[in-house]
Amino acid sequence: MFKLFMCIFIFHYSSQSGFQKDLNVNIPFPPILNIRDGIPTGHLRPLGWQSRAEAPVAEEPVVIEPETFWNKYIEKSRPVVLRGLVLGSEASEQWTDSYLDKKYGHLDIKLAERKQNFKSYKEKTQFKLSNFLKGYRIEDWYLNGIMPEEMQREAPISRMLNCGPFTTFCSLKDKNYEIIIEKLVKNFNKTWNMDIPKIAQLVEPYLWLSAGETSSLIHSHPEHNLHCVLDGRKDFILIPSEQFSSQKNPSKHDKKKASWRKELDLFESYNGSNEWYSKIDVDKINAYKYKILNSMKWYYSSIRSGDCIYTPANYLHQVRSHGRSLSSSIYFKTFKLPSKLEEIFGEIKSHLFNSCSKNAPLFESMASVQSHFLWTYTHSERHLKQKDFNENDAKYYLHYLVKNHSLLYENFENFYEEITGELKNRLSELKPLIRQALSLTARDIWNELADENILSLDQIYDLSDSKLEKLTKILGLAANFHDLDYFLVNDEL
């Protein structure tokens, strides 16, 4: 569902099929407002013309240390721009259309057709990259999807995301951390059977490619995002949501907090998803209808080749691309620890960041962290990257699904349907025991875990292995679906 909506929010500003698109990147931004008597400022103009920007997004030197980046921006949910962070990478230097066609043209990619009318959206899958490259400068096409693993060998990942809690994890069973763990958990019962949870997870890398001027809806994601432009230019509008829920007038606070999403015409992809999208036409704002935009505070930044911007989870933003726009995103998530471990979070975090080299290059090949991504991409679909699972891994996946400090059944159901969908479409080809396991619904598995439609973080980590047994098996089946040897060997579950 997440990737479906990632495709949906992209639509085109102006494109005439059959003609080469305008690849001009020298567009003034932020705009100079045109104020006319009797007409709301920015009426029928793009987003950004309705009120003046507050200021540029904060910028940091590219030499910022990973732990400083975490403390100053990730923990505080503050966006930041890092100029030239991936400048000189193989992708930014070599990924011309001809190079991509020659080296990666055989790959299947996700193709979205952009439409002015939100409801007329449609999506194509199993589209060869070579065919996309032949037509995207003329047709109303947009590439967005998980970056194939072959391409990750040349794509860059910042040093801020390839060390510390993103690639190193504490474990009670890992002898390398015996001393630090003994110190951290000395006050806990010796029989305590719980690994220290991950505090960060690389979710997936994304690839974006378009031509001409394109624009996204106003939206937010449940994950953090480090977005790096490899070619072209992107203009970002970032909208802090705390401005809409000010507590200056406490008596009206609750009402105001509940109404601002309605005023921005925001809807959630499904209940509890924390993925929000606005139905506002960002290319032609109705300033009479959306009066909230006339006083809205927003921040801006233009990102060019080699530049990166960090957008925190749940942060509203809108993006406009210019020219031949090629970029990569790395989505990642940070986790709240169970209450038993909250008091030692700082020590765990600092210990993990000690693994980061002070003299590391600004970026490395994304392939260096491939094994740490949660999702991979096969046959135009997402699949779990991890292949082997135990009950403790199942707890980590439940932890990953937590939104706003608790896990709702809706979050679990969406995840379960995604990882088992392809398998269930081919049940007749599978062995009886596997078909039997896959006959379990999301509700069947959930009932093994909880008595209600919500699980707290502490409840997740207190689950016994017996309660997690069925989920663990399903995770293994889903992750190994494309491995024929796995299904030949695992005759019994």
Image: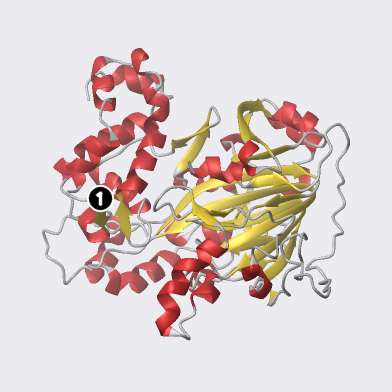
Q: In the image, is residue 432 above or below residue 36?
A: above
The answer to whether residue 62 is seen in the rendering is no
Check the picture and name the quadrant holding the C terminus.
top left
Q: Is residue 229 left or right of residue 397?
A: right
Residue at image position (71%, 54%) is 229
Q: Secondary structure at mark 1?
A: loop
The answer to whether residue 53 is seen in the rendering is yes
Q: x, y (%) of residue 183? A: 24, 71
Q: x, y (%) of residue 186? A: 18, 70
From the image, tell me which residue sits under label 1.
453
Quarter holding residue 360: bottom right
Residue at image position (29%, 33%) is 474
Quarter holding residue 407: bottom left
Quarter holding residue 390: top left
**Number of residue marks:** 1
Q: Is residue 316 left or right of residue 469?
A: right
Q: Nearer the viewer, residue 329 or 361?
A: 329
Amino acid of disc 1: Asn
Q: x, y (%) of residue 212? A: 81, 46
Of all residues, the one furthest to the bottom in this rendering is 248
Q: x, y (%) of residue 477? A: 33, 29
Residue at image position (71%, 31%) is 103
Residue at image position (66%, 55%) is 228
